[in-house]
Image (tube, rainbow, N blue to C red):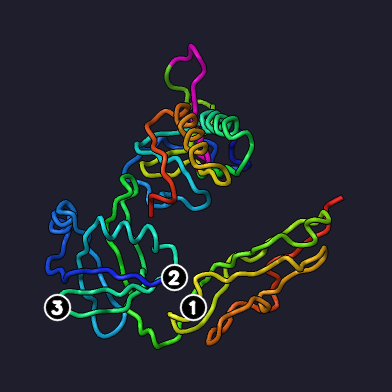
Amino acid sequence: MLSPKKVKHRKVFKGRSTGTAYRGSSIAFGTVGLKAIENGKLTSQQIEAARIAINRKIKRGGQVWIRIFPDKPVTKKPAETRMGKGKGSPEYWVAPIKPGRILYEIAGVDEKLAIRALELAAAKLPFPTKVVTRRTTL
Amino acid sequence: MFQVEMSASVRKETGKGAMRKLRSAGQTPAVVYGIGDGALALQLDTKTLMKQLLEYARKNTVVTMKIEGEGDKNVLIKEVQTDPIKDTLVHADFQEIDIEMERQFTVPVEYVGKAKGIDLGGEKTIYVNTIVLKAKPLDIPNVCTVDIKPLAIGDSFKVGEIPLPENVTLVSNPKKECVAILAPAK
């Protein structure tokens, strides 16, 4: 699963997600892409699950690009622990997503198949998305 | 070079509120600048503009902009702003050009045919997908086509060997290899 090799700080603030994605909001590599239309966070497990769903549908034909990377650590306190005593330990990694962000792109397969693969991937994600094609978007 | 006609009218209002009203009325704000002093604010029909931009925005295109009361201008599509969520048009920038003056353009390179070397087990490796050319805008080709049929294993094609039309000069490095047929990896 995706995670950074090295980080400057092991634990970071939770933060708030506002605004829309301007960078990474258009198809750059493939012909069909999956775009987030709401705020959210994608864990590395979710990113991997969606990637596997795409690859199983397109049967390893074509090429898939993952346009996001989970570089933010999320901490968790152990079970049955009283409050206080400092911040918990890093548990998993997330990619903060703003609406408009392209998550996956596909090229080299039939457009209908690529759209179906991305719809299957969308079912693995925790927020609404839409499929966009290079043919119909600028 | 592709050529297309667009019609526009001069826009007098500016600012967020007025532009939101304009967009909801089916018009897209745009601007043209480049030759002469200052920029000229325009408005175009969104549906027609979107249809034309989908076809030409990613290609080298000279647009003949027919502006009501201002005459015709030859322009290039400089920048298109879209809404990141709805993918609708927000604004378009056009740059006015003199079609008699030479300019640099990035032109795609297309490789056609099946090389001799591929039948013998070689692998085609493409190093260059676009080249930079300098010429008058209307002399620029839409695409540069390279026939790779004669290439055997170990042969390569250099950027300088790409056939170009008259009056067009190459700006990219002519010594750079653009495609090669490599021996199969053992």
Query: Which three-letter amino acid code belongs to the residue tagged 3?
Result: Gly
Q: Quadrant of the N terminus of chain B?
A: bottom left
Query: Looking at this rendering, what residue extends furthest in the right direction?
Result: B186
Q: What residue appears at the point 56 percent right and 44 percent down from the top-left corner?
A: A65
Q: Are marks 1 and 3 on the same chain?
A: yes
**10 Å neighbourhood of mark 3: few (<14), some, or many (≥20)?**
few
User: Residue at label 3?
Assistant: B69
Please, which chain is the residue tagged with disc 1 on? B
Specify which label sits upstream in the sequence, 1 or 3: 3
Query: Which three-letter amino acid code belongs to the residue tagged 2?
Result: Asn
User: Of helix, strand and loop, which one carries label 3?
Assistant: loop
Does the magenta segment cover residue A74? Answer: yes
Q: What residue appears at the point 61 percent right and 43 percent down from the top-left corner?
A: A62
Query: Which three-letter amino acid code belongs to the residue tagged 1?
Result: Ile
Horizontal side of residue A33 vs B156, given as left or right: left
Q: Does any portion of residue B98 appear in the rendered image?
A: yes
User: Residue at label 1?
Assistant: B140
Tell me: residue A11, above or below residue B137: above
- Do the CB atoms of the residues marked 1 and 2 lie less than 8 Å apart? yes
The residues bearing labels 3 and 2 have C-alpha atoms spaced at a distance of 27 Å
Which span of residues is magenta-colored? A68-82
User: Of helix, strand and loop, which one carries label 2?
Assistant: loop
**10 Å neighbourhood of mark 1: few (<14), some, or many (≥20)?**
many
The residues bearing labels 1 and 3 have C-alpha atoms spaced at a distance of 30 Å
